[in-house]
């Protein structure tokens, strides 16, 4: 059970998620992108909420909104809490903002009860996790770590506006992006609360889960090449049909990955048969492969097995197969000690802790390059996210807020 005050805090979080959802560039939809007027308005509103609970606030040189609640030892590394305030186009209202607003409520609890932890607590609303405008993700969190790759300032949006130009338009100096970088001794840990974006908690009938790792991913463009022929004149036993090979491989991907377990997933998300005529046997098929998992070694082993299976299918059918990897990101492990802190708080509230990986990316990926990270998942209806139907309940948010508060208080022990 959660206290009545925590339920009120959850209701406040939900109301504030609604208020942020009104800050959008598209009437009737939620779209809030990096370095836009809506970005500035959201930052201003969040800063007001931070200040109301005793935090000093500032916007850093890449556009993150930051707040700090001082601790007993000013020189001690702070706890960093947060998530992102930007969105995809036609988004839901909880992906990102829920984590920022529940973090503010944890500080509100400390402030209302005159509690100071040994260390300061900082809350950050990251400016750009989704990459919606410029096609590059984690711009806000990479600002804190000082790891903006060379060339990002020159990247442009659909209107040809560069990141550097957009920064200048809202009063930021692109020459000062490294001013957002925080020193290694500034923080001791990063905690992020987020909707699950999947159905596991709903299936387990649990409001909360503790994240073990953020999945690594490999993405490939693949191709089967056979020989196009007349659909009416080439006998079935003499065909070099690229599409049937691709279909066999797609089913093999499902079977092999399912048998592996271990939270590994693999998806064929795009397929194109050429020449694409109703009366022609497909001579070439282009298809994508997306493979993800919480540990890199099993992930790489699965990918190797899947590619070997494709080669075997192609050889047996008299075709050729090739694949080119165009994207790779390693798995990000959550800190074991921080997982246990979250897990203890969650178990006390719901009777057990469910530990699960995240199949989607988060700002914690960037932050983990510099500091220990942990994540808390909140159940979302049917696992829907990046969609207007994204939904959480006030009761689950109350439990999540209580778990967040309890975890923060564990740092005072």
Image (cartoon, rainbow, N blue to C red):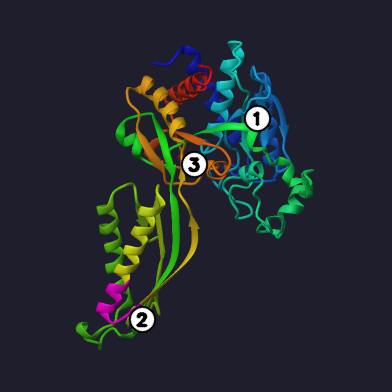
* Residue 56 lies in the magenta-colored region: no
Q: Which residue is mark 2?
A: 283
At 28% across and 83% down in the image, what residue appears?
A: 231
* Residue 314 lies in the magenta-colored region: yes
Query: Toward the viewer: 266 or 298?
Result: 298
Looking at marks 1 and 2 on the same chain, the residue that comes earlier in the sequence is marked by 1
Bounds of the magenta segment = 311-320
Looking at marks 3 and 1 on the same chain, the residue that comes earlier in the sequence is marked by 1
Q: Which residue is mark 1?
A: 46
Query: Do callouts 2 and 3 mark residues in contact (Cβ within 8 Å)?
Result: no
Q: CA distance from mark 2 to mark 3?
A: 40 Å
Q: Residue furthest bottom?
A: 233
231 up-or-down from 371: above or below: below
Query: Toward the viewer: 21 or 341?
Result: 341
Query: Toward the viewer: 405 or 182?
Result: 182
Q: Residue furthest top?
A: 113
As helix, strand or loop, the secondary structure at mark 3 comes to loop
At 34% across and 84% down in the image, what residue appears?
A: 227
As helix, strand or loop, the secondary structure at mark 2 comes to loop
Residue 253 as seen in the image, left or right of residue 170: left
4 up-or-down from 364: above or below: above
At 44% across and 54% down in the image, what residue appears?
A: 217
**In this view, the mark in front (3 or 1):** 1
**Which image quadrant for residue 351?**
top left
As helix, strand or loop, the secondary structure at mark 1 comes to helix
Query: Toward the viewer: 256 or 164?
Result: 256
Q: Which residue is mark 3?
A: 388
Residue 44 as seen in the image, left or right of residue 394: right
Query: Do callouts 1 and 2 mark residues in contact (Cβ within 8 Å)?
Result: no
């Amino acid at each position: 059970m959660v206290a009545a005050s925590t339920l009120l805090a959850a209701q406040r979080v939900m109301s504030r998620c609604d208020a942020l959802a009104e800050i959008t560039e598209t009437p009737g939809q939620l779209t809030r992108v990096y370095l836009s007027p809506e970005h500035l308005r959201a930052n201003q509103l969040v800063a007001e909420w931070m200040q109301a609970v005793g935090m000093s606030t500032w916007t850093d040189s890449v556009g993150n909104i930051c707040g700090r609640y001082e601790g007993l030892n000013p020189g001690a590394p702070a706890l960093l809490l947060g998530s992102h305030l930007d969105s995809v186009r036609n988004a839901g209202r909880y992906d990102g903002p829920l984590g920022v607003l529940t973090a503010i409520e944890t500080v509100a609890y400390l402030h209302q009860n005159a509690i100071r932890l040994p260390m300061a607590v900082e809350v950050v609303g990251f400016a750009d996790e989704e990459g919606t405008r410029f096609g590059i993700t984690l711009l806000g969190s990479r600002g804190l770590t000082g790891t903006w790759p060379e060339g990002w300032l020159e990247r442009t949006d659909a209107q040809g506006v560069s990141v550097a130009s957009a920064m200048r338009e809202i009063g930021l100096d692109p020459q000062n992006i490294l001013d957002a970088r925080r020193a290694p001794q500034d923080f001791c840990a990063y905690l992020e609360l987020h909707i699950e974006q999947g159905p596991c908690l709903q299936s387990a009938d649990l409001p909360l889960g503790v994240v073990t790792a953020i999945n690594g991913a490999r993405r490939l463009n693949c191709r089967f090449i056979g020989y196009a022929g007349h659909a009416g004149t080439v006998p079935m036993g003499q065909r070099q049909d690229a599409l049937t090979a691709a279909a066999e491989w797609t089913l093999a991907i499902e079977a092999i990955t399912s048998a592996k377990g271990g939270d590994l997933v693999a998806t064929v998300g795009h397929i194109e048969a050429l020449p694409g005529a109703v009366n022609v046997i497909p001579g070439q098929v282009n298809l994508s492969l997306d493979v993800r998992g919480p540990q890199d070694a099993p992930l790489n082993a699965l990918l190797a097995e899947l590619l070997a299976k494709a080669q075997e299918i192609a050889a047996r059918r008299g075709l050729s197969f090739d694949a080119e990897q165009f994207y790779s990101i390693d798995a990000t492990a959550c800190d074991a000690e921080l997982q246990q802190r979250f897990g203890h708080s969650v178990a006390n509230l719901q009777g057990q802790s469910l530990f699960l990986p995240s199949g989607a990316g988060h700002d914690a990926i960037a932050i983990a390059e510099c500091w220990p990270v942990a994540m808390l998942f909140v159940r979302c209806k049917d696992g829907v996210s990046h969609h207007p139907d994204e939904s959480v309940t006030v009761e689950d948010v109350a439990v999540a807020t209580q778990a967040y508060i309890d975890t923060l208080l564990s740092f005072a022990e």
